[in-house]
Image (cartoon, helix red, strand yellow):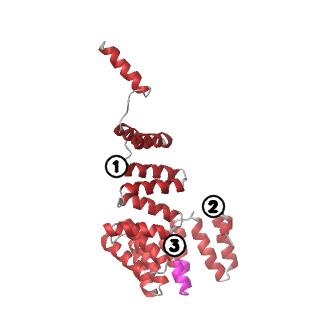
């Protein structure tokens, strides 16, 4: 008899006839996400929400739904899911960061800024929020505010490469050329194998009419990443401005060879 009821339990459970709990659906959804079964995970998350619509923990379930929808390219639906999560837990840092990141990809910097502000009101040392708020401020030409955020972040993490680069570019835009170049020189010393830093410094040197130094830095960037089409495009544009047409043409051809978009080639 015991064996009969055990067998009946297995059949009922496998056919979905045995009631599953909120916790069961959440655990199954997490397992489905680990297997990258997005459709299955979404159904399980929605079933958990249906069973217990008033739980505080639903904020995280809405966040998972938003991430699934983002991966599918359903950005409007993802924003709605993040919004529902924040209705449940208005100060949830992780959801605010996810929504802000999506707003950044949608180029809606004002709404991203609002979310980063909310995060930093609660946690003034949140590194991701500091970095992206500084970037937005720089784009909006609010250089003092951007500088403060970059410097705050660098006090927390002195070797944050992107923050150092962002600060150098901000100072360059803010007509502080000496500081900008000093910061770029320090970056190259700190990360001597990072080709993009040489390319950025070359652009600054070209703006300052330091043409030989710019050419040397472009050459070094290409030496480090010889199949990166962007560096050939940058150097080609540099040569073109100097009316060195043959060299420019050769670099543009190299860029195309390594996969540059033909629309980016003059």
Residue pointed to by mark 1: 57
Asked if the magenta segment contains residue 41, the reply would be no
Marks 1 and 2 sit apart, C-alpha to C-alpha, by: 47 Å
- The span picked out in magenta is 202-216
**Rendering coords of residue 42 (x, y %):** 47, 43
Q: Is residue 2 visible?
A: yes
Query: What is the number of the mark on residue 33?
Result: none
- Whether pointer 3 and pointer 2 mark residues with C-beta atoms closer than 8 Å, the reply is no
Is 216 rendered above or below residue 99?
Answer: below
Q: Main secondary structure of the magenta part?
A: helix
Residue 161 can be seen, yes or no? no
Q: Residue at x 68, y 65 (%)?
A: 262
| SS of the residue under disc 2 | loop
Dot 3 or dot 2, earlier in sequence = 3
Q: Is residue 206 magenta?
A: yes
User: Residue at label 2?
Assistant: 259
Mark 1 / mark 2, whichever is N-terminal: 1
Secondary structure, mark 3, is helix
For marks 3 and 1 on the same chain, the one whose residue lies earlier in the sequence: 1
Residue holding disc 3: 220
Quadrant where the C terminus is found in the figure: bottom right
If the image is split into quadrants, where does the N terminus sit?
A: top left
Mark 1 element type: loop
Total numbered labels: 3
Q: Depth check: give the residue in front, 17 or 120.
A: 17
């Amino acid at each position: 008899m015991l064996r009969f009821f055990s067998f009946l339990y297995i059949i009922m459970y496998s056919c979905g006839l045995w009631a599953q709990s909120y916790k069961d659906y959440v655990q199954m959804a997490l397992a489905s996400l680990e297997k990258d079964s997005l459709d299955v995970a979404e159904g399980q998350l929605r079933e958990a929400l249906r069973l217990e619509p008033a739980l505080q923990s639903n904020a995280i379930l809405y966040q998972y739904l938003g991430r699934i929808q983002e991966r599918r390219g359903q950005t409007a639906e993802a924003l709605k899911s993040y919004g529902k999560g924040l209705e449940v837990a208005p100060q949830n840092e992780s959801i605010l960061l996810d929504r802000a990141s999506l707003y950044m990809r949608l180029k809606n910097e004002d709404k991203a800024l609002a979310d980063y502000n909310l995060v930093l009101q609660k946690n003034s040392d949140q590194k991701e929020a500091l970095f992206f708020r500084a970037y937005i401020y720089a784009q909006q030409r609010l250089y003092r505010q951007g500088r403060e955020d970059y410097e705050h972040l660098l006090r927390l993490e002195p070797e944050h490469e992107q923050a150092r680069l962002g600060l150098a570019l901000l100072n360059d835009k803010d007509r502080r050329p000496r500081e900008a170049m000093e910061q770029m020189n320090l970056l190259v010393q700190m990360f001597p194998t990072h080709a993009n830093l040489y390319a950025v410094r070359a652009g600054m040197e070209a703006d300052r009419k330091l043409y030989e130094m710019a050419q040397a830095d472009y050459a070094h960037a290409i030496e480090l990443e010889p199949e990166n089409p962007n560096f050939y495009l940058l150097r080609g544009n540099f040569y073109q401005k100097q009316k060195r047409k043959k060299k420019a043409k050769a670099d543009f051809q190299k860029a195309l060879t390594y996969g540059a978009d033909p629309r980016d080639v003059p």
